Amino acid sequence: MIELAEIFRRHGPAYREKHSQQLLPSQRRALADIELCRTEALGGHLYLCDQCGQTQYSYHSCKNRHCPKCQNDAAQHWLRRQQALLLPVSYFMVTFTLPEGLRALAYHHQKQIYHLLFQTSAAALQELALDPRFVGGQIGMVGVLQTWTRDLRYHPHVHYLLPGGGLSADGQIWYRARNAFFVHVKPLSRLFRAKFHAALKRTELLHQVASATWRQEWVVHCQPVNTGEAALKYLAPYVFRVALSNNRLLKLTETHVTFRYRDATRQTKIATLPGETFIQRFLQHVLPKGFQKVRYYGLFSPTQRSRLQQVRRLLSPVAPTKATEEVQLQTIAYSNPPSISCPACGRPMRHLQTLRPVYCRSP
């Protein structure tokens, strides 16, 4: 099977040489990490099967959050933690998309614009939901930033997963949303646009945006997603990597990369790109170091857990324990080598040696 690391190893050196001045530090790090992922450069472990004498090398992963082979365990832990927070009500997915006129600015000022995208969309959604004509109470939101289309083009947007209802100001009533309706997207879109404009006006970037951007309709989408379980499973893999799994890669040559994707109608399409173009498309989705692509608002904010517990008491006769709500992420340390089975006979293999890295990644 073709892997992203193989593409980076084959086409990365030429790309790095040609575009070195344009690479952001986070992109440079991702390119280097993924090239070395699960190779002897990062060290690892040597195993021996006492039954058949087979030896097996297990190299360390790069642990970069944009690597398609890493972070699967972290994604599963995140998914379980979010499942523990689900309320026994219908859920909605609301998506806010940055218009074309703001995307170049967003790419060159990622931390600032992505933060404003989160801040203003969450504020607009809560403000409209407080209107008694829609929900009439405080809502809870889990927001996940995505920057890609299915064929890896740049398309920044935020998905919010939220329970269908809100808590009254006094915390005594849960107002249920109608089954297939949460809020009207047209006034939500305009409120989002107005809040984003006001927020950008407080920066030095507003003059870089064409005035027509503020007159056009912005895209906001809202749809019911039943219990929220399926939506969480959709979001979980993308919390810890870019939307490209290795199994979508079909062909790698000295000049081109071919991969499959689904278009907006869910039809399978095939894209063949020059290696340089493919790497450029991938790297534009690498986030700045330390940027939080998942954020919690309203009832799901860490400071509002007492009100979330009150919602649970209103919705269910049996309140969950604190242990149910707090599912901690675990990190597998290099000092505890994983147990593996022999690829030849299937018996457990014995850890023989720890292999030190031969490459030191710069900070």
Image (cartoon, rainbow, N blue to C red):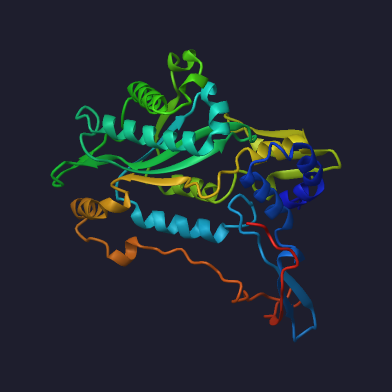
Relative to residue 98, is residue 358 drawn left or right?
right
Q: Quadrant of residue 200?
A: top left
Q: Residue 90 in the image: x percent, y percent?
A: 32, 43
Image: 322 above or below 66: below
Relative to residue 127, is residue 317 drawn left or right?
left
Q: How many marks?
A: 0
Q: Is residue 180 visible?
A: no
Q: Residue at x 31, y 32 (%)?
A: 182
Image: 339 above or below 5: below
Q: Nearer the viewer, residue 131 or 356?
A: 356
Q: Nearer the viewer, residue 283 or 218?
A: 283
Furthest toward the bottom, the residue is 50
Q: Residue 227 in the image: x percent, y percent?
A: 37, 46
Furthest toward the front, the residue is 204
Image: 146 above or below 69: above
Q: Residue 17 in the image: x percent, y percent?
A: 79, 41
Q: Residue at x 45, y 48 (%)?
A: 232
Q: Is residue 194 visible?
A: yes
Relative to residue 201, is residue 287 drawn left or right?
right
Q: Nearer the viewer, residue 147 or 317?
A: 147
Q: Quadrant of residue 287?
A: top right
Q: Residue 256 in the image: x percent, y percent?
A: 81, 38
Q: Quadrant of residue 118?
A: top left
Question: Dividing the image into 4 quarters, which one contains the C terminus?
Answer: bottom right
Q: Residue at x 52, y 67 (%)?
A: 331
